[in-house]
Amino acid sequence: MDVLFRGATVVDGSGAAGVQQDVAVRGERIVAVGPDATALGGAVVIDAGGLVLAPGFIDVHSHADHTLPANPRATNSIAQGVTTELVGLCGFSVAPLAADASRAAQLRDLAQGIGPDLDWSWRSFGEFLDRFQAARPAVNVAPLVGHHALRISAMGMEDRPATAAELASMRSALAEALAQGAWGMSTGLVYVPGSFANTDELLEVGQELKQADALYVSHIRDEADGLVGAVDEAIAIGEQLGIRTQVSHLKITARRNAGRIGPAIEHLEAARGRGVRAHADVYPYVAGSTYLHQVLPPWIKAGGLDAMLARLRVADQRQRARHDIERDEGGWANQVAAAGGWHNIQIASVRSPARRAAEGRRIADVAAEAGVDPLDYTLDLLVEDHGATTMIVFHMDERDMRQALSWRWSAVGSDQLGVTGPSARVHPRAYGTFVRVAGWGVRDAALFPLEEAVRKMTGLAADILGLKDRGRVAPGLMADLVLFDPASVADDATYEEPTRPARGVEYVMLGGDFAVEHARPVRLDLGNVLRRPAQG
């Protein structure tokens, strides 16, 4: 397709001020910007006066590898102008799948709640990417391999240090995934089995990242009282291995820590001053979302999902969990304490039809209506729902979120999970993150000018990932583009109505074809799996 965007304010992703000019597209590439584009013209002319033309937004934190294979036509991202997503975050990837059947089942169990049931008919990371590509998702995806998958394949869900042989197995599996197209490795150090791994294990396995100059992305061990130390671990891994390191959804949780994110950002900035390629991703909300079973201490999940559910049926094990949650003596990410109580924890999605009425409700409220203790309600729900329930936790202060989002080296990540369709009970970030940054972040909160917002969502994101042909508006680059109205772009998704679509995005182009026209999705099969090019 030959297209001319005429008279747009081009915000090119570099952070430079927008310039009103024309942009010409031929096939899948941008071929000219400015007077040269005007001279070329186009078979299709888009009158873009008063609108901003930017690179397609890049979501550097998504769990869509758990949803898009089964729901490839999802509109939540493309309708916001997102054209590429980094997937396989927080240690969670659905490949490689262990040859041992029981360990493969543990990885499948770990995926419950992140998305719908997948067919799990692959074994290697490359085989999964082949299946993903065949689905032709609505957006491009750049895959990471999750540390959970590597550790489960090597040693299951055991709570102990890895042996030399198990470390070698993890390294070999990581090397294979990198060779098959992974852009790096993610860790989820508050989730089992990642929480069972020590720093030495991550450094040893990470030697493969060093050899490939690949990316390390970490959901760090502590986002509350121990935030600075957890950030320092991510920095140390990037520094010792000499690779890019990204702190996932940078934030500080727990009401008692309100206003205290500054030291963590100072440590990241100091690391950059030493030459460490340290970054973060942030979403513009004060609530997070994850498994409901994250309210439980890690020991209860050793051995996998079935072992956890068995413990939840035993009275003395429930009492031990209650002791750990209510006493809050540290050593783990206590979500109930961080939220300040059950009234700040909302049930997001429930798989059991008998419990669907609880979706969108606060646990304190539904427990009171049922006449039971909130923890007992939660444990019974987890057992009945086979551990698949997800939650939304209101545990952040807006001042800290604003400071993290404003940090120059923070890119934008939605952390979306569970997007199964227009009726899905999800966090509104899945439908609103990017337009919220461009709208609320620029116009209402005045955190940064529009050019900086676009840089965070495009050029910076591409640099972090190592995407060479996206993230800028320049001749020769891929024609992944978004045309939006800077005066009206906004998020309408709320915690009560989380799938309300974005406003103000008029056109989205993916690889030179229109995915969105006149603010309506028209092609939802334009995405590709972007495999990391072979090195050497």
Image: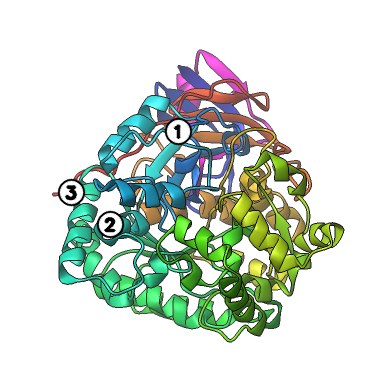
Q: How many labels does the image show?
A: 3
Q: Compared with residue 523, is residue 415 higher up or lower down, i.e. above or below?
A: below
Which residue was labeled with disc 2?
214
Name the foreground residue: 60 vs 321: 321
**Mark 1: which secondary structure?**
loop
Residue 254 lies, in percent from the top left, at 66, 76
Q: Distance between the residues labelled 2 and 3?
A: 10 Å
- Marker disc for residue 69: 1
Name the foreground residue: 414 vs 80: 414
- The answer to which of marks 1 and 2 sits earlier in the sequence is 1
Residue 489 lies, in percent from the top left, at 71, 42
Q: Quadrant of residue 289?
A: bottom right
189 horizontally vs 468: left or right = right
Residue 38 lies, in percent from the top left, at 51, 25
Q: Compared with residue 369, is residue 423 higher up or lower down, i.e. above or below?
A: above
**Mark 2: which secondary structure?**
loop
Which residue was labeled with disc 3?
535
- Marker disc for residue 250: none
Name the foreground residue: 469 vs 381: 381
**Mark 3: which secondary structure?**
loop
Q: How far apart are marks 1 and 2 (CA)?
A: 25 Å
Q: Compared with residue 131, is residue 411 higher up or lower down, i.e. above or below?
A: below
Q: What stretch is highlighted in magenta?
A: 35-59
